[in-house]
Amino acid sequence: MDYKRILTVQDISCFGQCSLTVALPILSACGAETVIIPSAVLSTHTGGFSGFTFRDLSDDIPAISAHWQKEGIDFDAIYTGYLGSLKQIDMVKDLFKNHTRKGGIKVVDPAMADNGNLYYGFDQEYANAMATLCKEADIVLPNITEACFMTGVEYKESYDREYIDTILAALENAGMKDIILTGVSFNKETTGVIVKTSKGVEYYSHKKIPVGSHGTGDVYASAFCGALLRGKSSFDAASIAANYTLRCIENTIGDESHKYGVKFETAIPYLIEELNK
Ligand code: PXL
């Protein structure tokens, strides 16, 4: 098996099963050497909790990069998630420039909004800056809310295929290349992902579980990157990640004491089986 090295940049939410505490184990389980830069340290994620701590680690990022440049440390893939501040968006652009191996891929999950709303602490200026980072990526993984904030397309709860095509065109107009649009649901029973690459547009749909869980976007993006590094096509990686995320949610619902992230650990054996097919 090819041994690939990935850098992921996102926060550590100490409790809550999202961002780095999810990305690192999932990418490692997929067989990739996983290198991290924590963008911030929080006591919990910002959704569903109040009074969380937040330490911005922006100042450490240029120093880490400078050291790595001296050591010649670079990556087959760089994948970014939740970033702690506007200035980190520019820092990530520098990381892309200075640490992507020849032929390496840059993946951006804009991780800033859901269900029509920006997460706590973000505003339109941040969304605009995130759009400029997405333009530099090879693959972006927005949900519909994030796509709307980055393009100015009106957010809708229910829609048809024409609306999705409008969003895809707007993202493309904004300079984005391959697009994995998540949470695309045309009826009550199913949801899915649109995969737009140079080969065309495909839709993968699966059963919808009508519960919202924190961190599922991070579970999804991490499994997607892990599958991609295992040599899967974007469509296969998007489908495997969708099935895995669904399994994580299924393994969590019904546990009233688990109201934050999903029990992603319990489905790691399933993810590995799917990757080995
Ligand atoms: O899962 C996305 C995420 C990551 N990190 C932090 C968050 C959230 C979503 O709310 O608050 C700190």
Image (cartoon, rainbow, N blue to C red):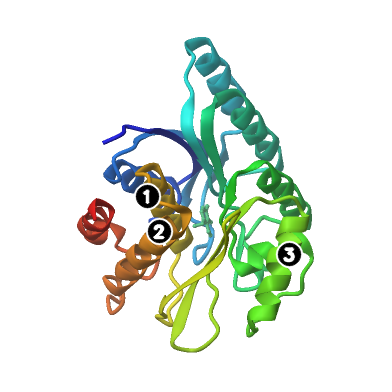
What is the quadrant of residue 56 in the picture? top right
First of labels 2, 3 by sequence position: 3
- Residue for badge 1: 227
The kind of residue tagged 3 is Ala
**Residue 104 rendering spot, x and y as whole percentages:** 51, 33
Image disc number at residue 169? 3
Image disc number at residue 236? 2
First of labels 1, 3 by sequence position: 3
What is the secondary structure assignment of the residue under circle 1? helix
Image disc number at residue 52? none
Q: Is residue 138 above or below residue 1?
A: below
The kind of residue tagged 1 is Ala
Most foreground residue, 166 or 66: 166
Mark in the foreground, 1 or 2: 2
**Inter-mark Cα distance, 2 to 3:** 23 Å
Q: Is residue 240 above or below residue 1?
A: below
Q: Are marks 1 and 2 in contact (CB under 8 Å)?
A: yes
Residue sitting farthest toward the bottom: 188
Q: For the point 42% across and 80% down, which residue is it?
A: 208
Residue sitting farthest toward the top: 70
Neighbour tally class for label 3: few under 14, some 14-19, many 20 plus, Cα within 10 Å: some
What is the secondary structure assignment of the residue under circle 3? helix
Would residue 254 be visible to someone looking at this image? yes
First of labels 1, 2 by sequence position: 1
Left or right of 249, for residue 185 = right
Q: For the point 37% across and 33% down, which residue is it?
A: 4
The response on whether ligand 1 sits within 8 Å of label 3 is no
**Residue 22 rendering spot, x and y as whole percentages:** 37, 50
Q: For the point 60% across and 73% down, which residue is it?
A: 115
What is the quadrant of residue 66 in the picture? top right
